[in-house]
Amino acid sequence: MNKENQPQFLGYLHSFRGFAIINIVFIHAFAYALYDFNYQSMDLKSPYSIANELLFHNSTIYFAVISGLLFSVILKSRGYKRFYSSKFKNVLLPYLFLTLVFSIFNPVFEPPIYIPFQLQTDFNSYLHAAFNNFIFGTAQFPYWYIPILIFLYLVTPLLDYLMSFEKWGTLFMLVIIALPLAISRVELMDMEENQLSLSTMIYFSGAYAAGIYFGNHPEKKFSWVKKNMLLFVLIALLSSVALVYFQTIEINKFGDWSLMSALYYIQKMCLSGIFIVLFKNLGERQPRWLNPVASYAFVIYFLHAFFLDLIAEPIMPLSTMHQIAPLNLFLASITYLVLSIGLSMVIGLIFKKLFGKYSKRLVGV
């Protein structure tokens, strides 16, 4: 890709990053509101829960696709030394710092009781918790993805090497992209305490490999997506209908294989292609309001769960105002969404003011 075209690509990819983090935060914001709305319980078969899962579940796939695209289009040409140096400074260090911060808490969740800010009993308990939280991504509930992301960085040379085969490279990559249809991720609510799942690593490797593949000659490949947009939309719609149907009749697991996991992968991969092309078609007319959200996406990812817990009690009266239901549910969800994103961005801005360029190594921005 020539230099003239590169800023345009970065513009629409930047917008897609903003779109992705809003999706990721929204599923959590709606779940918090829905938990109190349902009298501190979760009914996974309720139409509200089904809609939330349908629209936003597995949106972390968007982040994996973005990471793969960024590697192929920008980072690969800089060499692996700079690639791993930047990931160490901008991903691993803030993950370590925030894990150390949030490990002071020992949250208790025994439905309907949830105490998010209970402190560790002593320093040894803190050290033990900090070590486990760092290895398994359990300091805050969204942190499970960071060990997965580190795994994706580690296998990047292998994926890049497979891609380099002139005759078989495309076939190798397509097989890896298709693996999540056969190998299911472990869902957060199904995870045992301190469990890091190889199947989840493989699952997200498919989306990451797709990003690497489409980032190799992106103009040509996204032009193909544009030409086949109707097919992408049709598959996204059909997979969405199937998701609603199978969740309603509670058909999912066949041994370790999850039908829902495969359908969510199909849906979110198709939506990735659709939204990237839609943003790309905007050229330099990207939505301005998405720019700051995208710029602070990493700190939002790191901090939004903390702020959801922090504001849960003040928002509870709105979530339980059933005389205006379901309007109160949607108002509470939007309040959770806006405040958790906004407060995360404020903390990011404060760290930038205090620590300058080093804030990226502390909170990711």
Image (cartoon, rainbow, N blue to C red):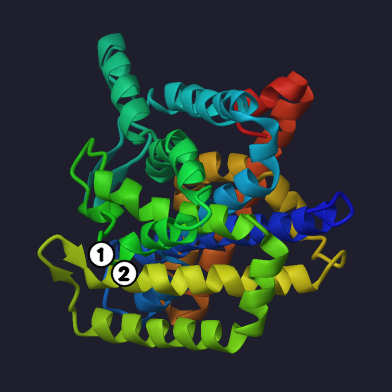
Judged left or right of residue 223, residue 314 is left
The tag on residue 182 is 1
The residue at the point 46 percent across, 51 percent down is 312
- In the figure, residue 126 lies in which quadrant? top left
The tag on residue 322 is none
Quadrant of the rendering where the C terminus is positioned: top right
The tag on residue 262 is 2
**Callout 2: few (<14), some (14-19), or many (20+) C-alpha neighbours within 10 Å?**
many
Mark 1: secondary structure: loop
Q: Mark 1 to mark 2: distance in Å?
A: 7 Å
Amino acid type indicated by mark 1: Ala
Kindly give the residue lying farthest to the front in the view shown. Answer: 167
Residue 38, image x and y in percent? Answer: 32, 70
Amino acid type indicated by mark 2: Ala
- In the figure, residue 144 lies in which quadrant? top left
The residue at the point 76 percent across, 58 percent down is 9
Q: Is residue 337 visible?
A: yes
Q: Nearer the viewer, residue 55 or 160?
A: 160
Above or below residue 74? Residue 229 is below
Residue 37, image x and y in percent? Answer: 38, 69
Q: Nearer the viewer, residue 344 or 226?
A: 226
Quadrant of the rendering where the N terminus is positioned: bottom right
Above or below residue 311? Residue 260 is below
The residue at the point 44 percent across, 45 percent down is 309
Q: Nearer the viewer, residue 221 or 169?
A: 169
The reply to whether dot 1 and dot 2 touch (C-beta < 8 Å) is yes
* Nearer to us: label 1 or label 2: 1
Above or below residue 327? Residue 208 is above
Mark 2: secondary structure: helix
Judged left or right of residue 83, residue 31 is left
Residue 170, image x and y in percent? Answer: 48, 60
